[in-house]
Structure formats: C-alpha cells, structure tokens
Image (tube, coloured by chain):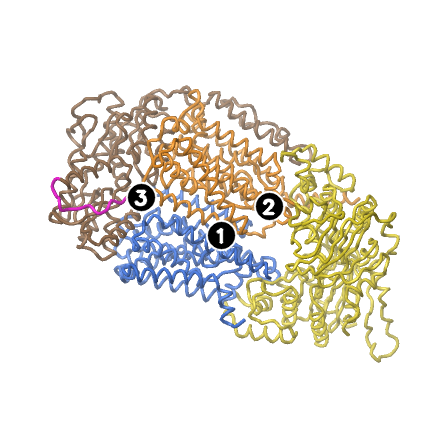
Amino acid sequence: MANLGEDRFRYPAGPPACALGINTNGRFTRSALMKSLLSLVAIVFGSLLAGCKPSAPAPAGGTSASGSAGGTQLTIAFMPKSKGNAYFIAARQGAEQAAKDLNVKLLYDGPTEPDPAKQNEIVETWITRGVNVIAAACENRDGISTALRKAQSRGIKVITYDADAQPDSRSFFVNQATPEGIGNALMDEAARLLNGSGDYAIITASLTAGNMIDWQKAIEKRNAEKYPNMKRVALRPCDDLKDKAFAEATAIMNANPSVKLLMNICSPAVPGAAEAVKQSGKVGQVKVIGLGLPSENRRYVKEGVTDSVILWKVQDLGYLTIEVATAVAKGELKAGAASFRSKKAGEVKIAGDNVLLGTPFIFNKDNIEQFDF
Amino acid sequence: MSNSAVVIKRHFRELSVAAVFGVLLLVLAVIAPGFFSRQQLLTTLTAAAPVLIAACGMTLVIVCRQIDISIGSQFALCSMIAGLLAKAGLPMPVVALGAIASGGAMGAFNGALVAGLGLPSIVVTLATMVTWREALRWSREGEFVKDLPDHFQWFGLGQGGGQGVILIGAMLVFGVLVLAMKHLSAGRYVYAVGADRESARLAGIRPGAVTFVVFVIIGGLVGLAALLNAIRFADVDPKTGTGLELQAIAAAVIGGVAISGGRGNLWGVLAGVLLLASIAPALVFLQMPPQWEKAIQGAIILLAVAVDGWRTRKEANIG
Amino acid sequence: MTMSQAKSNWSWSWLRRLEALLVIVLVMELLIFSRTGTNFATRENMFETIKLSVEIGLLALVMTPVILTGGIDLSVGSLLALCAVGFGKFWRDAGLSWPLAAALTLGLGSLGGGLNALLITRLRLPPLIVTLGTFSLFRGLAEAITQGVDNFTGFPEDFLAFGQGYYGGVIPAQVPIFLVVAVMVWLLVHRTTFGRSFRAIGFSPEGARYAGLPVPQRMAIAYLLSGVATALAAMIYVARVGQAKADAGAGYELLAITAVVLGGTSIFGGVGTVTGTLLGVAALAVLKNGLQLSDQPSELAGILTGGLLLLALAGEAAMKKISARRGRLATLGASRGQSG
Amino acid sequence: MPVPLLKLDSVAKSFGAVQALKGVSFDLQRGEVHALLGENGAGKSTLIKIITGAHRPDTGTIEIDGRPVPHLTPATAHRLGIACIYQQPALFPHLTVAENIGLRLERVAPFSRINWPARRHRAELLLRRIGAGISHDAEVHALSMPEQQLVEIACALGAGAPIVIMDEPTSSLTQKEQHLLFNVVRELRANQIGVVYISHRMEEIFALADRVTVLRDGESVGTRWVRPPGADGATGNSPAPVTESELIKLMVGREISHLYPPPEGPPGNTVLSLRNVGCALSGVRNVSLEVRAGEIVGLAGLVGAGRTELARVLFGLTPADTGEIRINGRIVNIRSPQEAIACGIAYVPEDRRRHGVILDLPIAHNISMAVHRRIFPGSWLRLGAERRLASDYIRDLGVKAWGPEAPGNSLSGGNQQKVSLARWLATEPKLLILDEPTQGVDVGAKSEIHKIIRRLAAKGLAVLMISSDLTEVVGMSDRIAVMRAGAIISMLPGGSDAHTVMASALGQKEGVPA
C-alpha cells in the first residue's frame, strides 16, 4: 500500500507487501494474511481511539457548547417527524429563512418516513458531532426523551416544536396552538357541517405522538360538552402516510356506512381521505375536514370533496422555532418569560414552557386561493 | 390416463389456487355481498392490476431460474419519472413511453451484470434495490410530485374511464405474455434455459442473451405497471412500490411457478394475484381485524409450497 | 441465482482477495471521514458506531452459517419485530418480570427459527421461498398482536440499561454481549465440526450426505441459531429505542445479507468467514456514521452501500477471471511438474 | 475413397493436468456406421463433445464434406447437420416430448410463432417410426431412463442430419429397446447417413458397424473393417474382417494377467453375508451374496443392472425393506450412511465429482469428513490431528499434491480418487464397496489404484468392487458376481475370461439380436 505521503498523518507508512501475507510465489497463505489484515485494522483503530486526530481541534470526550468548527456561528439541528411530509417541508422553509436572517448554521436531517428509532439515531449522532441546540418534532414522546436528556447532559440546549417530548427533556416547546384551541376548532367545524348530529371517524398519525394524544383528548372533551349526539365510531392511525390513510378511510367507510364525516388530524391523511371518498363515489355524503396545508388540499376543496382545512402558518412555526432556539442558545430567553418578540409572528405568548404561535386558522373554498404554502 | 386426468395432474397447483379463490368468493357472496358492489370490485381490481403486470414479469424471471428483488425500487423510480414528465407538460403517450423505457433501462442494467459478468441475480438485484431506493429518497427527500396537470390522473378520462384503461391494459399485457410464453419460440427458450442451461446451450440456444432479455422485459413491464398505478392518484408518492417484489414473488410461487426454474404458467399466477389482492378487502367485509392480512398471506405462501413439496416427495417415492 | 453456476471455482484464494479488498475500503473510510466528519475520530464516536450496529451485526453473524449451507433467511427482520412485540406483550400484558419475558422471547425466536428449519429440512423446500413466507407470517403476526397500532413503551430502567447504558461511562452495554456472541459464532464456524459441515453442505449437499454427515440436522441448527440470535437482537433493539412496535427491524434482513456478502461469503454457500462478515458490518456502520457526521443526508449511506456491494461483486468477478487465466497458466506449468 | 462426410485430423484436448485426447484422426463416409470402441476413460466422450462443438480442441482440424470448420459451436454444428444422442439425455424435464423434440430440431427465429400441431404430428411420426410406445404429450420428467433415451434417438432421427452420433445409446436401454435402436441405425445407413456409434461392447460393434476405430488412453490405436465393402458376394480382394479377440487386444493393448496384482493367500472368514436383500424403491430384488475378509468380489453387469443400487442399499442411502444383512455374523439394520459407517461399511461412490470428493474443500477436510466423531471428540476441531491423518494417507496412497491444504480441484482425476479412497480407509472399515474405482482415470493412476486395492485386501479387508470395465473385473476379482435387472444371476470364479462374463451379463440364452 503506497505511503500516503501526507505528513500531517502520524500513521505508520503502509505495511510492506510481505506483511500482507503475499509470500514469494504470489500464493496468499491463509493465516499470514489474516494476521496482517487484523493488525492493519488494529493500527488504524488504535491511533484513532488514542484521540490523535488530525484536524478537529475540539478535544475528545465531552463536546463543549461551542463545539462547532466555525467557533462563533451557532449550529442549530432541526429535525422533522418525517422529511416526506409536506407540512414539515413548509416548516423547513420557515426555518431556513430564519437561519439566514439570524446568521446561524442550520443542520436539517430526519427519517424520510416516520420512524422513532431513526430519530433517536440522528439525535445520538448530533450529540457526538456537537451542536448548540436541537429542535425536534417528536414522533414518539417517550422514546426520544432519553436521547434528548442525554443531549442536555452534554450541554446541548433542547427545544421541541409541533409535537412535544417529555417536559423534563427539553427547555421550551414551540406549540402552534393550544391543544384545546385545535381540538375545539376541529369539533366545532365538524358540528357545523353535520349541524350537530351524526357519526364521525378520526384518522390520526400514530397513537404515540404527543400532540395527537393531546388533540384527541381535547376533541373528546369538546364533543362530550357541546355535541352530545355526535358519536366517534372509529379512531385509526395512518403513520403519516397518504396511501395508508387512503386504505384506512376506504375500510372505515365500508365497515360502518353510518359515518358522515372523516376528521383527519395529521396533514397527509386529509388528501388521502379525500381521494378515498372521491373514489368510492361518496362526495357530499361523507364530509372531509382536518389539519392540513392549503397547497395539498386546494384541488379537493375546489371540487367540494374536502369542506374545510384547519391549520396555522407553518412557515411561521419553523421561523419561530429557530428564533426561540437562537434566543435559548444565547441565553436571551430564560424559563418563566411571559412573551417573546418574533420578527414574523409578532408578539407571542408563553404559557409556562409552551411558546404559543397563535390560534388555528380555517381555510375553505372562499379563502384557500390566497395562501401559497 | 384420460386426457382430463392428465390436465388435472399437470396443473394441480394452478387449479387448487383457483379453487381456494373460488371458495373465498363464495363465502364473501354469502356473508358480505357488499364485496361484489361494482365500486368495491373495481377498486380491488385496479389495485391488483399493476401487481399482476409485475408478477407476470417476475414469472418470466423465475422460469429462467433467476430472481429480481429490485422491482420495488424500479416501480418507485418509474412512477416518479412519469410524474415529473407529466408535470413538465409532456403529453401522456410520451410520459408512458418514458416510464416504460426507464424501467427497461434499469432491467438492462441488472441483466448486464447477471448475464454479462455471471453474477448471482439475487445479490445484484439486492444491491440495485438498495441503491435505487436510496437514490430516489436522496433526490426527492420523500417529497410528493404535486400539482400534476389534470390529464395525468386517470389519463384525464375520469375515474371510470381510467380504471377501464388500467384493467384493459393489464389484461392485454397478460394475454400477450400468455401467448408469447406458449406460442412464441422465444418464450419457450426461457423455459429451456430455466430447466437446464447446459442442455439449452447444446440445443443451440444462447442462455446469456435469453437471461439478459428477460431482465429487460421485467423492467419494461414494471415501468408500465408503475404508470398504470400512478395515474390512480393525483400526485406521486416516492414511497410507492415498497414490498412489490415480495408480492410478485409470492403470487408467482402460489401460482405454481417453481423457484428452481423451467416450470410454471401465467394462469396460476393470475389466480395467485387475485387471491392475494382480495385478502385485505375480504377481511374488512368479514368484519375481521384487517391487521391479519400479512399473516394470512405468509400462511398461504407456506401452505402452497408445503403441499407442493409434500406432493413431489410422494411422487419421487413412487417414481 | 443460477443454481447450476459452477460452485467449484469459488476457491479459498478468491475469498481472501475479497476480504483484503474490504479492509482497504474500511481503512479508506476511516481516513476520509476523520478528515471530513467533525468529532468522527473520537473514542466516544467509535463506541457509538458499534452500539448502533450491534443489532445488524448479530443478524449478520448468524446469517453467515445459514448462507454457508447455501441457504438464506429473509425472515430475520420480521422475526425481530415479532420478538420485540412478543417481549412487550409478555412484560406489559402478561405482567412477567423482564428477565422471564426475555427468556420467553428467546423461546419465541427459536420457535420462529425452528419453523424455518422444519420446512427447509423435513420437506426439503427452497430456503428462499420458505423464509419469504415466514417473512410475511412473522410481520403479520407482529401487526396482528398489536392491531397494527399498539406500542409498548416505558420499560424498566435496568432493562433499558442494556440498550442505553454504559459500563464505566464509555463502553455501551450491548458491546460485550455482541463480542461474546461473535466469538461463539466464530468458534462454531471455524473451530467445530458444525462449521465444517456447514461448508460441506454449502459446496455439495449430496457429497456431504454420501460422506455420512447428518445434513438435515446440521442445516436445522443454522436456522435455529438464526432465530435465537434474532430474539436477542430484538431485545437489544427494544432496550436501545425504548419502544416495541410492529414495524421494527424493517429491511434489517437485507442489510445483514449485504454485510455477509460484502464480507466475502459466497451466496451459493461453502466459502465465507465470520471475520469477513464482521468486516462487512464494520464497513457499513462506519460508512453510515461517517456520512452523518460529515453532515451528509443518511440516504447517501444507502446509495454507497449498494454501490459498494456491486463494486465488491464486480471486482471479485474480475479477479476470478484474472486468477482463472493465471490458474490455467499455472496448471499447465504444474501439470508439467506433476506428471513428470 | 470418395470425399469423407466428416474428417478429424490429429485432434488433441486436455483438461488441466489430464490429457484426454492426444492427436486422434478419424473419418466417416456417407451411408457408413463407423464405430468408436474403447474402455472407460479412453477419450470417446471427449471426441464426441469436440465434433458437436460442446468443447473446442486445443490442436487439430475438423472437415465436413471436405470443407474445414475452424470454429465449431453447438449452434453451428446444428446448422451443418450434426445430430447427437448423448449418454445422459440433454432434455428439458418439465416440457412435453413434442416440445423437447421441437426445441432440438427447429432453428426458428425467436419471434416467430410455434406451430404446435406440426410439432405434435412430427413427434408422433418419429416415435412411431422408432416403434417407441411413448405419447408425444407426456412430460419428459415422468418418463423412465430408457424412454428418455428413445426421445433422444427420435430427436437425432428427426434432424435428418447427414451425420448422426450415438454416445453409448444402449447404456440405459432394456433388451426390447436395443432391438428398436438397431433397426433405426440400419435405416439411417440405408438413407446414406453417416453414423458414428460409440460403445465399449463388442457384440454391438459386430451387429452394426462397417468400420471400427479403437481408442486407448486418448490415442487411436487402429481402424479395422468389421463388414468390408463388397463383402456380400463381391470379389475376394477385400481385407479380412476383424475378429473379436483382435479388437479386445487392441482395446486393452496389454497382456491382462501381469497387469493386475495376484491375490495373496486364502480369504478369511465371511465379513458380509446378504440373504435375499431387496429394496422395492430402487429395484434391487432378493440379492444373496457373501464376501470374505481379504477377498475381492467383482460385481459385473450392464449399466442399469442394479449394481450401484445394491451398493446404495448396503450403505443406507436407500435402506433395504426385505432380507437380511449380516456383518461378521451379526444382523445389522442400516437406515442411514452414519449407521453403515458405524457397522464398518464404507462406500467409494461412482460419481466422484458430485458424491466423492468435495472439490472446493482441501484434501485434509475431505479425508477427515467421515470420521469427525472419532478424531474430533466433543466436536472441537483438532487441526493438528487432522493434518497428521491426511499426511499419513497422502504418503501411504501416493497422492501427488502440494500439501494437505491443497483444494480438491487442483488434483488430477487419479489423485482425487485416492483422496476419496483415503476418506473411507480412515473409517477403518470391515467392508469396502468400490463403485467404478478407476473410471475417468489416466492409465498411470489406474494401476496404482489396483495395487492399493489388492494391498488392502491382503491386510484382511473385504472388498466388493463394481466395475463395467470387463478386463478390470476379470483381472482384479477373486470371485465375480454378475447382476442383471436388480438380481445376481450367476457367480463366476476369478480368472474367467471377459467374454464369458459379458455373455452372462447379457443373459446369453437369448443371444444377441441379429
């Protein structure tokens, strides 16, 4: 193996050919080769483990808060529940805009499909890599909390957005709106469309996502209080996947014909359920509402399959998350603060450790054209 | 043995699968006639059509004593290409051609490595499956292809017309392949190469060329299947096609295609595809928990293969 | 896979060439990533990489004897999910203590492996098809048990320590377990008659039977071992991630097979070493970790893995052609010497 | 002499260390049956594979109708009209007879339609012409070996090729089918087709051939007239027809007696005694036989007489279902190879490459494979002990290899057979069954193996040797058991000549069909 010639590398020159076990007549002897191969790997591993690394200045072991290569510029690691979800693509646009405005380095990574195991892996890698702040949307509230607590113990600031982790594993939760706000908006809209009575079904992302659980409870409370003769006949998860939502919606409509409305509380499910209603020829008989992006549902709203979509300005959520992350990293935002000034979302209330973006907004046939996200 | 007895003995597997499917339909007719509503039947068949096209391609590959587990990724890439071409405003025939050609190209890549370098097909297609799927994820980052022109979904013919095109397309492909495998000498060459590569060579057939063409054909068929599946929706999901290779192999195996090559016909595969496709809706209509679908599919594969294994062992003892 | 592909030319020397190729790839990875990845070349990151690759490593370890016999096991990924969900059910719903639940899960794993072994050896069915059937069956059972929805979390602290804890703050808890299993499998394959019979069966099942080796029993052992190790990997996975869901371990079987084939084991059986498999697992793990630390998206690791596998195969096929030509020259020379 | 239909000029071919053909010249006229005679391993099959393009010769030229053919592949051979009946039928199991014949005969463009009725009709015609009672619709894997051979013959007949090659066509034919084959050959000759007929049986040559070329150890040692031209009533100047003993001498080429080491001393007590042993599955019918210690019992008979099947019964591969097997007087029940080894029975199989030596494993692994339990207690490998065991046998049997670690495929045929032998000697058997011990082995190694066998017998080992090489059976055996159709039909003393053994094997009473 030719000598690498880089003097900065303090590895021994490549072992001579005969050590590689190639003896005189070109015949690999089995045991000789094995010994040299393993010794080669051992040498390289040994030198690395001894921590004599060529370039990165930061010492081995604990990564200090300023651990990024650039020295001053903050590194904020931003993780969606799944990269493929249009909702998080819009949130990323807001985050990138904020990173540019605040001159911070944005690291964006996450699983392409919702997968809590991959989210943990990426957080672990960010801990080793050393970042200033981790802002994550949590697919599984309990699973990710252990990893986030480990990050905090390494001096990395942790905040969550869109879906929360366990409160002790993060300093702030940037919440788009209070669960009650979202639950009530959905329940009231459903009641308006069915004028107060009839069966409905909920399609959620997964039964472990923190925000989903809170929204379901809020909807149930609102249903019990205000609309006694509306009954939820089914609650099915779709793992944030459009075609799974399509299959679940079709199955629900077949299994219980009495359903009059499909309430989808995760964004991919709204177009999925709408397509299912369209293809089983039940447009008008079964209403479709949910939390979804205008851009994804514009076609269905115009065709009257989907009646109304409730959401919030997702780019602002992304923008606000990065602002909060930077403020926390610089120590400008401490626990117990009552409000926070955001360039995009204006004056934002803080309830306890929840930074509230604002109240949900209802898009329907009349106003959906004005929104581009 | 009388002629009908010979037919039964030779096509035992295909007939038994068709019988099981018949029993399932009977049970459904009695308990849940809703299954046979025009709408439900159409949805089930349109969902099964692309799997049938892929399973036909897979039958060719398995009869030639090879295997291709990369068709899931090929399916996703071809759907994506179809979506992007349509979004670029190209007319649908060009989009169709683009999808089929890209499928054929990927099939040719597999074929070149397997037939050219003589590498084992299971490992080559394992590598290409991982590479193509991850390349698609890297480029699209899971983002759907959205805002497709109106003439994309259902070829612009509306749901009824669209589903019609898909079903006719699948039947056409099935018909052509059945004729080709029975009456075209190239089709018989596939059986010969699959049965005994050396004898085929001695009979003057070129096994390498046949193997290469088989991989190109399955690529093209998967491209067509991807197109026919993509037009069912208004946007294209990059995660589509996951697990298609296992469905296609399962349908072929249940339909009596021998994994050791040289044996099997498409009618059995048709019965296999229909049986596997109707498990999920049947469960819903029989009020059984839908999560049992995959377990039942697995059980059917094992049962079909076990019965076959037991029969050949019994035959071997007498013969 | 062309059954009739001439197995006889997968000779010993071919295997060593592929392992040498793999070591060079591994060393290159280490050097490149220690420059591009931040904090890549640290002791902590090395252990982190090993910790994340223990599950795939276990599956690849026990996949080696299976492939050595000329078989394959596609069902390990699904069996991992079934064992994870089973463990959750035993612990949460049946209320058993986690060590007892762990023992029962190992039993469940051996049942899964046993089913594969029974169908493959008793009815002499092709392993690819049997494990394809059990691939769907096990995943289906996992989904049925959890109604596709349920998720087991909140495991006791001392169980989670196995997946997330560290000995002496540095060595992840699952590393010693992995090393013990690795040594045991290495001894089984390279230092016992079982390993010898796996190879013989892989090269020529008929030849092994005529030589008086108990072929069905030995193949059954390989598949049973695969089941038990999968159960162990499932529990380490649950401890590490802190949850058990029906979609666990998706695609793990393909990663394990990739690592084994990358390590020089021939897919037709007979030729292959455990050290080669370990090198394969290491190459894949370092690749994934290095790319992530170099701020590359994780999909790039998948692309390079596929590319690496194709490179290894094509490279090895080319080497075989060169050595065959060199071999022909050598035998001509040798024949002159031999028949003199 | 008119321009020969087919002419081979000093064709040579070697596979690695083994030189299969050393410069063979051969020519075939139109309307002539030219036989190729030679012992096993004399190079007959290699020559055929060169003519049909399956192998390319290292040196030498091939001419068809006087035109040299430089680059012959199976496809071009077909086009030039060379049809061949292989010893192992090259058919497609799960396809029908009509289709098999169709695939072999039609050279049709890939995308043209198959005319199934025409195929069925032609197949029916050919089958009727041969007189084979097979339906054209039957799947080949359901046919018996003789029936598959008839399909091969139908393919050759149907090809209408000017040159037809038959490689040991009667090897798996019963008496009735042989009769059909002889008619076909006569019909081909009448239609001016050149037939190359390969066999190692004297009576077929005299029944069919015009001329015969004898091959020995890869060289042609002479071409003789069997039925000289103008023999029927033409003038007297034609050369005298060759006699059988002259052919045997040419074929064997050396005095038989001094070749094979003589037995040393009287045989000991009975080791193996079979009393009407039978196995329905493999067609072995109530065999009674005894083999004494230090004695070599030869098991002679045509291929398909059930000799290998008997060996497989004794070794537990296809367990016996009737009769009694005694080893050293004790009744044993053998249901698997492991039990056979435990009883002291060892079987060196016929197909060396598939069942004997595992070519990809080193010699040491092969030799120790049957005695794992003994030399590896607790199933822990002891590589030192294994290497010593292997080195002893390598020295003892004179295996030429660069060491115990050498892989099997680096050895010549003879050395591979010695390794196979060494494996079974390591089990220290009481009875050693040898199945075609010297098949496909070069002459040098053949005599070495014979010496080893005799030396083992001298040390008190009971040997049961199966061989279709008559001179070997006669030369080596103390007693000869002749088998036909799964049963032992006669016991001949050692030293009886090849002809009587063959006569008995053929069941001379019915005589050779005219």
Helix, strand or loop for disc 1: loop
Q: Amino acid at mark 2?
A: Val
The dot on residue B67 is 1
Q: Which chain is yellow?
A: D
Q: Colour of chain A?
A: brown
Helix, strand or loop for disc 2: helix
Q: Position of residue A351 (x, y in %)?
A: 17, 27
Name the quadrant containing residue A137: top left
The reply to whether the magenta stretch includes residue A235 is yes
Q: Colour of chain B?
A: blue
From the viewer's perspective, is residue B174 above or below residue A141?
A: below
Is residue D317 toward the left or the right of residue B89 in the image? right
Residue range corresponding to the magenta coloring: A225-236
Name the one closer to the observer, A259 or C282: A259
Q: Which chain is orange?
A: C
Q: Which residue is mark 2?
A: C215
Structural distance between the alpha carbons of marks 3 and 2:
51 Å
Mark closer to the chain start, 1 or 3: 1
Q: Which residue is mark 3?
A: B143
- Find the residue positioned furthest to the front: D330
Structural distance between the alpha carbons of marks 1 and 2:
26 Å
From the viewer's perspective, is residue B68 above or below residue D131?
A: above
Q: Amino acid at mark 1?
A: Ile
Name the one closer to the observer, A39 or C69: C69
Name the quadrant containing residue D77: bottom right
